[in-house]
Image: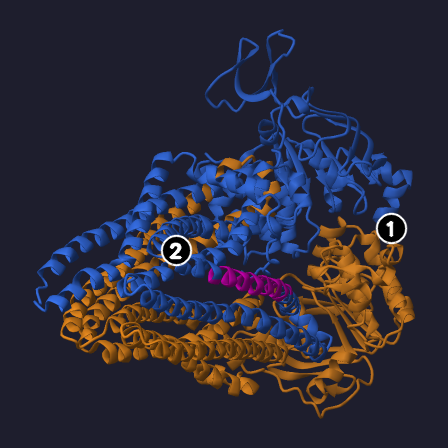
Chain colours: A orange, B blue
Amino acid sequence: MIKKLSKSIREYKTTALLTPLYMIGEVAMEVLIPTLMALIIDNGVYNSDISYIVKLSILIVVAAILSMAFGIMGAKSGSKASCGFAKNLRHDLFHHIQDFSFKNIDSFSTSSLITRLTTDVQNVQQAFQMIIRICFRAPIMFIFAIIMVVHNGGTLVAVFAVAIPVLIIFCALFIKKVFPIFNRIFKHYDKLNRVVEENLTGIRTVKAYVREELEKEKFDASSSAIHDDFVKAQKMLVLINPVVQSVSYACILAICYLGARLISVGDMGTGELMSVFTYTMQILSSLIMIAMILVQLSMSKASAERIIEVLEAKPEMELNENGLKSVEDGSVVFEHTNFSYSGKDTPLVLHDINLEIKSGEMVGILGSTGSGKSSLISLIARLYDVTSGSVKVGGHDVRDYDIKALRDGVSVVLQKNTLFSGTVRSNLLWGNESASDEELTWALKSANADFVFTSKDGLDTVVEQGGNNFSGGQKQRLCIARALVKKPKVLIFDDSTSAVDTATDFAIRSALRRDVKNCTKIIIAQRVNSVMDADKIVILENGYIDDVGTHDELLSRNKTYQDLVKVQLGGKDNG
Amino acid sequence: MAKIKKLPPQKAKDPKKTFKRLFKEVFGGNKLKLTFVIISIIISALSTVYISTLLKTLIDDFITPIIKSGTFDFSPLLRAMAGWAVIMVVGVVASYIQGRIMVTIAQDALLRIRNKMFSKLERLPISYFDTHQHGQIMSRFTNDADTLQQMISQSIVSVLSSGLTIIFVFIALLLNSWVLTILIVLTVIVMMKITKTIGSKSSKNFAFQQKNLAKVNGYIEEMMSGSKVVKVFNYEDQSKKEFDKINEELCSTMTKANTYSFIMGPIINNIGNLQYVILVFAGSLLSIITGGAYSVGSLAAFLQLSKSFTNPLGQVAQQVNFFLQALAGAERIFELLDEEDEKDNGYVTLVNAKNVDGVLTECKERTGLWAWKHPHTDGSGITYTPLKGDIVMSEVDFAYVEGKTVLKDVSLYAHPGEKIAFVGATGAGKTTITNLLNRFYDIQDGKIRFDGININKIKKSDLRRSLGVILQDTHLFTGTIRDNIRFGKLDATDEEIIKAAKLANAHDFIMMMKDGYDTMLNNDGEGLSQGQRQLIAIARAAVADPPVLVMDEATSSIDTHTESLVQEGMDRLMEGRTVFVIAHRLSTVRNSNCIMVLDHGSIIERGTHDSLLAEKGVYYHLYTGAFELS
């Protein structure tokens, strides 16, 4: 796990390695200072030796300045290395995901990818930062301080032989008890947030059914659960302070007594006794620190695993970068095409598809949910690879093209489409970076997205995240326009006009016929209306082609089509 | 769930007032407990101070005499230590008691505040949700409540106890040596200055960091949810480039912010060390000058005490920023709590009724017969009107925002059992009309009457109970399918639920699911198709069995089979009820008693399907698809 992640350290390797060294320097000084102070008191103050005091004071000042310098350098290199590491990790993840195929994308949910790139990276960064800074600092301080106790107090170190195991046992018990409770609390929190979120999105439903009280009960249940578990956890948390205090007090008492004996026989100085008190605090606090690090690291382990899972996923598709560089024309041919989403062993979504579409035709595809419409068209732009058989565009197998060239030639308006924050212009330029304003205007007009022109800012109208400042129908029309900017050889609509009204739908189709010539148009639709006037209508059923024909042909011979027309148009052809 | 972290909260506008209110909220009902907490804090602070002076006692009163006398008699020391142990135990116990009481106080307060917030949320008018981003409201419950939690359960006590310790220690320091105390105060001032400078730099850089982090997270969110679009448009390289740029920016601000917060520790620590040197130096001089009157033991004690002075000071300094942040969060929470409730001055209620000798009388049991109970304000007694579902709108004007009229002079009526369809382009005001019926919004002018009663006089909950609503977007809650249907009528029996599901045509697909009616739905009905969600929504309305139905037909695509099931279910549901429907299906429109064609907030045509077609007006063009209404 560490090996995999450490690949992302790269140019920050030196900095990352230097950080612990700085930390060691800082700790060494920090541990040295109390001893120097002991010397001042024992040799300087007791003997009224001013010159000794001056000498040692200068030494301490030097040590403090060194410690500060090491500390500052450690802070700088620590944050540089950890932030840099996080940057590289984010970079690696993002680039890797961009190279994912549709199949890869399907296997991770969007929200989980987002969590991995944000929260998980932050957790790992935190852990990394802890490893290079505190993971060295605390144990080293612990060891140094013990050594100094032996040096200054000799047998006093025996006190810690008792105190340390007591604290370790306490920490272990504590972590074991409190950890599960906190895990529970996180789950309660999820539930609580879910209730709030559901009530925000569904407030109209709640109010319409006068169910405020019911929802309050749900919320109260979760918030009471949080309350109860928190009280349980906190009851234990408030033990930490008293326990640590007790242990340190016990140490102080023991040191007082043993120290007094040592001093009285002249084996130790008063100053040395004082330094032992300071070291006691250093030893105990570094122990607590180590315990906290362990908790933190174990919490970020899950994050690290999730990140690695993404990094290890292999892009599924051969991109064929040396393939054909342009799509000749818009003809599309399916030959004995079989397709299943996850390889040969899973049930086929498309069975033995044979279909020929001539360049420039308008083709409609109808069929119920799950009949394979979206799967069919996704093969044309090679969003997925066929399981067997072939798909040809412009006379060549789609796998013979450089995938970029193919996707430039075949423009798909996806069913679940998104706009990106920016302006209308910046969104449209996705289709073609160097498109002129005239071309953009043309695309918008053809997509019946005239509303852009009536808005004050025209092409520079702001698009919010997800295009949320537009209505469903407007979004769809902008997505169509974006696809048109590409000037593709094949244009595919996957149910792309579901949110526009019948009249607009009709207008878009007329505009496509008029403005977008020499381009094959393939339209998946739910409404018969949308495909009635196509050159060819394909009826899909359970992954098989049921029938292909014109509206009139199908109306006369195809049962499914007749039913559709009956349900949707009330049995009469009013087109 | 990955929401973009919001920018760091701004400082509170009126921290003093907010703090007072918060204090009252937390400790208000707990005066006795609060007293215990304060006493415990005082005791534990005193014992800490006392323990810091032990070194002096040890050296001056025990070790020095022993060395001088050379008797090696440790029994007085042991006796004294027994006394110290008692004080230590008292201190530890006090600190535990204080902590333990605070747990209850803090968690109880948080529970109260959370529940208050949510019940406030449920009482807010719909317009509040229109004008506030969900993410923002959400962050009151998450970010703000979390910081508040930390503040109440930790910071308040730590600041209080630190403050008391500082005062006690200061007194002890003064008693020990005023000369050295002056020195300590001077160094502390320097320390504070530095803390403040670094602190403000650090918080400034943290604000930058949060801004850049939000930018990067936002970009990630967009690109991940649009990842398929990215592929379709060959946008991978471009997005990598853009990402690298903002990622680089984030890295550099993050490094700065982290550096500032990391260097605080070593700097403060070592100023502490320097302070120590100064004190040792000055103390030694003092000891030598006074010829030992200022003892080594005193110096040792002073040095020990000085740590008990500077450490809590550092703690308070670090808490200040967090404190202000938490107060800003508390202020926003209070803002939410102070929002105005949805107003309801209605006094006409819906009651169970029975017919006794032709006279409608109120009764307790469920009779299936409902009546409006109308206590007249003029004192003419109470009248009972049977619930029938007769709706009249007359000359209704409405605007969401003052001045921007959405509906103008809309008049219409629906007799019990009639079906009224609204058609028109997006934005014509169809949904608005339906929103007025259940008083999600109140009209500016005109009147809406329900069974002859002005709906302003009807208690909102009763009005809404008598109206069934099927919204365009079906919203399902986490829970079983049964729970979701039961949402329509909480005391519905299982038989009633199944009956409703059958009526809605939902029964068959529900039975096909793994756990039938007990199948858990998550994430707004994840895994169900659009059509299935609609069927559940219909069942939910069916189980509520209201006399009036308001429906916004979904435009979203569903397959033909489900489509016909939905249509059948809807038709059955509409039977015998007064129905207002925003229609997208030709069949629904055609079966309506009256069709209203809306345009820019006015009814421009009305009539039956046939009469409107014959008119060859807007309706005709709309449905022959030759003309866009907008």
In the rendered image, which quarter contains the N terminus of chain A? bottom left
Residue B208 magenta-drawn?
A: yes
Please tell me which residue lies in front, B594 or B256.
B256
State the residue position of label 2. B178
Q: Residue at x 37, y 61 (%)?
A: B306
Residue A247 shows up from this direction: yes
Q: Residue B607 carries which label?
A: none
Whether residue A527 sits left or right of residue B54 in the image: it is right
Quick one: SS at disc 2? helix
Q: Determine the chain carrying the residue at label 1.
A: B
State the residue position of label 1. B628
Whether residue B558 sits left or right of residue A411 in the image: it is left
Calculate the distance from the C-alpha at mark 2 to the C-alpha at mark 1.
90 Å
Q: Determine the chain carrying the residue at label 2.
A: B
Q: Nearer the viewer, mark 2 or mark 1?
A: 2
Q: Residue at x 63, y 77 (%)?
A: A98
- Residue A425 locus on image (x, y percent): 82, 67
- Residue B146 locus on image (x, y percent): 49, 52
User: Is residue A372 placed above or below B105 in the rendered structure?
Assistant: below
Region in magenta: B187-211
Corner quadrant of residue B416: top right
Q: Residues within 10 Å of mark 1 (few under 14, many from 20)?
A: some
In the rendered image, which quarter contains the C terminus of chain A? bottom right
Q: Residues within 10 Å of mark 2 (few under 14, many from 20)?
A: few
Magenta-colored segment: predominant secondary structure: helix
Residue B416 magenta-drawn?
A: no
Among the two numbered marks 2 and 1 on one chain, the one whose residue lies closer to the N terminus: 2
- Residue B372 locus on image (x, y percent): 60, 19
